Amino acid sequence: MAPIPRAQRASPAVAGYIASNLRAGVYPAIPALLPPTGLAAQRVTELTRELVTSRGGELARWLSSRPRPAGAGFERVLRDLARHTRSLDAMLKGPTPEASATRAEVDAALAHLPAAARALLADEEQHPFKPFGYEDALALAAARWFKHEYFRWVDPIKCAQCGGATRGSGSGQPTAEERAGGAGRVELHTCTQCSAVRRFPRYNEVKALMGSREGRCGEFAQLFYVFFLALGLEARYVWNSEDHVWTEYWSPELGHWVHVDSCEAETSKPLLYDRGWGKKQAYCFAVGASGAEDVTRAYVDNWDECLARRRAKDLGGGPVSEAYLAQLILALTVECRAHIGDDECARLESMDEAQQRWIDNEKGRWAEAERANLRGRESGPEEWRAERDELGAGE
């Protein structure tokens, strides 16, 4: 018998309902979300219309009177991060045909990396950790190439006309072309010598980023994440509440998600920010096609101190409880998985279990950190890094 096709991706409301039942133990696993029959869909539409017609006012009053849980800011962050759960093809499509990148353009930029990875894999002296497989070599080769050859850190911003230094002079509205590249805002920088104004649109569309090949950590992580997917790696985008972003990939050799920072060309150094930079983090969320995870424990040295920071962190709407945050993250994972087949669900659940074993092995993760060279931040001007207290111990 042919397998019954699952429905399309779950809506946030349906995913939230399923997540609540998962946490309550009603469901043992994410249930198959099957497409409704034509008759069922028609009946739901009729019942909804009847409810709105007969009790619409009462329903509206009930909805408006319901207290919203604290942590609305965290909801907004996760909804924004949900764009990183899209497929590679969806990420390549800009808002207009002119703004859309093609797979051929991306593949051409990355064509040399598999050979570089094979060469790296063959040279055991270059293996930064063990076991070290092809995916690990590909990720490391990509990170080194991306930072040192392909993309450029843009701060300090030089004048486009005379090459002189600039100073920040506020922000401006993006042009239609800049908006097509995903820029919601544009930084303005005025030259201290010739007074020319340099525009720095904060792009997030692939074609625009490949055209400019410059940015800061946001642009680095956004394009690098897409490149990882194009290389065939299972990848996630990682957001940090203390103003940094990076990437992870799944390593079959290591059996867990592996940290990669394309700004620093560093891999498998999750305690780089805590022990190296001296960054006091509260939240780190990883988001990809397979769902979301609160990965903070992997990136902090002292979990008890981190919990105290989490209780005080307010992203708008007040601090969030650990239980409600877990519900939000699980709901996003349900959105990503409720429509996929049983075999793929089982594979992802096996990955989840392996990842959790690695997270729980605190001593093992600390031993990995002891072997790593965890230094202060390199990307960005020294004065800016000092203001952010990211120079590291002894600096």
Image (spheres, grey):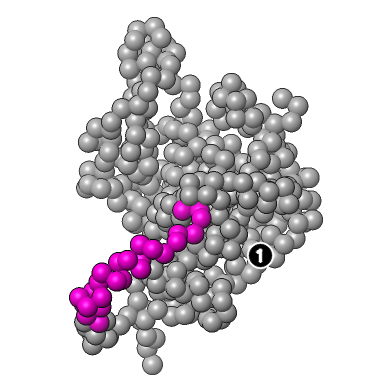
Of 390 and 236, which appears nearest the observer? 390
Of 130 and 339, which appears nearest the observer? 339
Q: Is residue 24 above or below residue 194?
A: below
Q: Where is residue 11? Give x, y as percent.
A: 36, 68
- Residue occupying image coordinates x 70% and y 57%: 131
Looking at the image, residue 93 sits to the left or right of residue 242; the answer is: left
Q: Amino acid at mark 1?
A: Gln
Numbered label tally:
1
Looking at the image, residue 17 sits to the left or right of residue 385; the answer is: left
Quarter of the image for residue 382 reads: top right
- Residue occupying image coordinates x 29% and y 51%: 93
Of 71 and 100, which appears nearest the observer? 71
Which range of residues does the magenta coloring cover? 47-72
Q: Quadrant of the C terminus?
A: top right
Residue, disc 1: 356
Q: Residue furthest bottom?
A: 1
> Could you tell me what secondary structure mostly forms the magenta stretch?
helix
